[in-house]
DNA sequence: TATTGTTATACTCTATAACTATA
DNA sequence: TATAGTTATAGAGTATAACAATA
């Protein structure tokens, strides 16, 4: 007797339910590596593209700059990345992975990939691609879909 | 120059990016109705299935019972649902929508459905179904995918 | 003993304003 | 003036322990 049939017609609701169901497992998978989702993501892009500045990372990952500071702090403190002054712009830092950071990322990546693969174990390859394509389309449509919502008449000012 | 190619191979990452991109728009869509995502969800299931107890709602929506209390409070204060003592069990409350609650939900539902439809405007119907099927498969696999992650050897005790 | 609703609390994630140092 | 990094802060969302009333 599932009573959320109305909600299940909404892509956004199914999206949220899937996301929260997955998040717990991702966190548990990363915990033994001393990583959270944000730190893992930052380590990933720094390993993939050494020399990025913090503002670049914030744009790539859609994380606000202030929220990145502590994340990068913890990666630096763990010895997995380094901050070095950018040549030609003494305001910016360039981020580089250490050798320990590279190897640690490789291990965490293997574990997370294995977990991630289990999430779609019930789907064939075409279905997985369709899922990712759909997610990317929704992500791209998100901001523009808001714009049309500007004029509303059923306004209520309750908490 | 997208530097999150590694991350984009993970269903979980694409899921999170889509979710956060959508969440903002959902909140903006619901705000004029005095609703947030949680209050909308609760109102939806109470309208769909009048007489549910709070513990039922928490199970259907996968929300912890303590976190439901304030949500239901605000819906009750707004006059959209009522708490009435369950017959035969004086511990529980049964939740019923008011007439105002039904009509208000209908309006919010129309707005949110319109927004939600725009999210998948670039996809054909088959692709939307594939997306939802994929999301539901991932949601179902989430908890069981964790279990296999129990034995780890690359342990690090950093923050 | 177990369950329903509740309170209190804590932790994470996210968002914004404002500061500093540089450009 | 504008930008990079930072600090402080506030707001959601989520999770757990513990209590009173009732079963």
Image: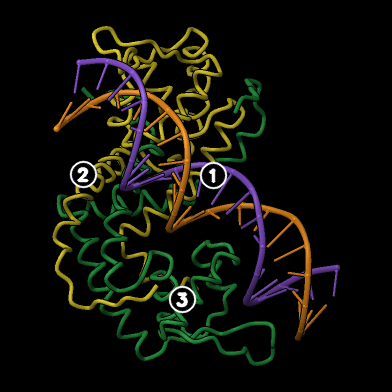
Chain colours: A green, B yellow, C orange, D purple
Q: Is residue A134 left or right of residue B2?
A: left
Answer with the quarter of the image where residue B146 lies.
bottom left
- The residues bearing labels 2 and 1 have C-alpha atoms spaced at a distance of 25 Å
Helix, strand or loop under label 1 = helix
Answer with the quarter of the image where residue A79 lies.
bottom left
Where residue B113 sits: x, y (%)? 46, 28
Q: Chain of mark 2?
A: B
Q: Is residue B59 above or below residue B21?
A: above
Q: Is residue A61 above or below residue A156?
A: below
Q: Is residue D8 left or right of residue A74?
A: right
Which label is found at residue B24?
Answer: 1
Quadrant location, the N terminus of chain A = top left
- 3 and 1 marks in contact (CB < 8 Å): no
Answer with the quarter of the image where residue A102 lies.
bottom left
Helix, strand or loop under label 3 = helix
Q: Nearer the viewer, mark 2 or mark 3?
A: 3
Q: Nearer the viewer, residue A92 or B155?
A: B155
**Within-10-Å neighbours for mark 2: few <14, some 14–19, many 20+:** some
Where residue A69 sits: x, y (%)? 56, 71
- The residues bearing labels 3 and 1 have C-alpha atoms spaced at a distance of 28 Å
Q: To which residue does mark 3 refer?
A: A74
Q: Taking the image as drawn, is residue B146 in sight?
A: yes
For marks 2 and 1, the one nearer the N-term is 1
Q: Nearer the viewer, mark 3 or mark 1?
A: 3
Q: Taking the image as drawn, is residue B117 in sight?
A: no
Where residue B12 sits: x, y (%)? 32, 57
**Within-10-Å neighbours for mark 1: few <14, some 14–19, many 20+:** few
For the residues beneath circles 3 and 1, the answer to whether they share a chain is: no
Q: To which residue does mark 2 refer?
A: B140
Quadrant location, the C terminus of chain A = top right
């Amino acid at each position: 007797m599932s009573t959320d049939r109305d909600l299940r017609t909404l892509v956004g609701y199914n999206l949220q339910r899937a996301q929260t169901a997955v998040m717990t497992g991702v966190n548990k998978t990363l915990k033994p590596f001393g990583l959270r989702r944000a730190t893992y993501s930052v380590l990933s892009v720094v390993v993939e593209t050494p020399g990025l500045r913090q503002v670049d990372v914030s744009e790539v990952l859609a994380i606000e700059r202030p929220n990145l500071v502590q994340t990068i702090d913890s990666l630096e403190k763990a010895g997995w990345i380094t901050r070095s002054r950018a040549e030609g712009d003494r305001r910016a830092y360039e981020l580089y992975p250490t050798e320990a950071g590279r190897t640690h990322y490789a291990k965490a990546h293997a574990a997370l990939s294995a977990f991630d693969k289990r999430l779609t174990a019930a789907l064939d390859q075409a279905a997985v691609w369709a899922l990712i394509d759909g997610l990317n389309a929704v992500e791209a449509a998100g901001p523009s879909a808001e714009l049309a919502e500007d004029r509303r008449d059923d306004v209520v000012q309750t908490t």
